[in-house]
Amino acid sequence: MEIYIIEMPKVKEYSEGKILDAWVEFISNVGDFDMSKANEPIEKAKQVLEEISNDEHEQYLAHLREKYILDQNNLLDTGYEKAKTEIAKKLKAENADISLIMKVTGLTKEEIEKL
């Protein structure tokens, strides 16, 4: 198994005419993908995508998965922001320099002064 991380805006710049390029084009243009460029795995992926797209239950499950991921990310972000604020409060209570607090927490001077 291989895992690739692809920056979509840079795809054309680094295109080498390899199989990965066909996958990137498929992912980018599913509806308009030229199937003459497809190989067997891409054809199978398109078939599975069409089956899932036509199944209301699968669409619902995909929606729930996406919602779960967004909710988890939101919880993590909220916890991180709360932790930054608590650290800033403690540093401020210890009379730490505001520039140090800004550097450690990433908060702005105004945000720190409001604490």
Image: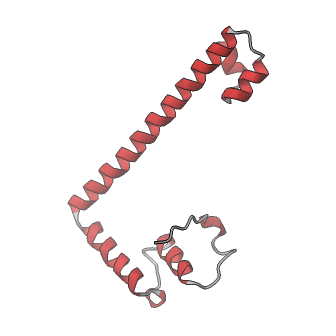
Q: In this view, does 56 lie above or below 83?
A: below
Say which residue appears at 45% left-offset and 86% top-offset. Answer: 38
Residue 92 horizontal/vertical position (percent): 69, 12
How many numbered tags mark residues here?
Answer: 0
Which residue of the protein is positioned furthest toward the bottom in this rendering? Answer: 36
Q: Is residue 38 left or right of residue 6?
A: left
Residue 100 horizontal/vertical position (percent): 76, 23
Q: Is residue 71 above or below residue 64?
A: above
Q: In this view, does 82 lie above or below 95?
A: below
**Front in this rendered view, residue 96 or 44:** 96
Which residue of the protein is positioned furthest toward the front in this rendering? Answer: 1
Residue 7 horizontal/vertical position (percent): 61, 64
Say which residue appears at 42% left-offset and 44% top-offset. Answer: 70
**Front in this rendered view, residue 93 or 77:** 93
Figure colour scheme: secondary structure
Q: In this view, does 111 lie to the left or right of 73?
A: right
**Front in this rendered view, residue 97 or 21:** 97
Q: In this view, does 114 lie above or below 67?
A: above
Q: Within the image, what quadrant is residue 52 found in?
A: bottom left
Say which residue appears at 65% left-offset and 75% top-offset. Answer: 12
Residue 33 horizontal/vertical position (percent): 46, 80
Q: Is residue 80 left or right of residue 72?
A: right
Q: In which quarter of the image is the C terminus?
A: top right
Say which residue appears at 53% left-offset and 24% top-offset. Answer: 82
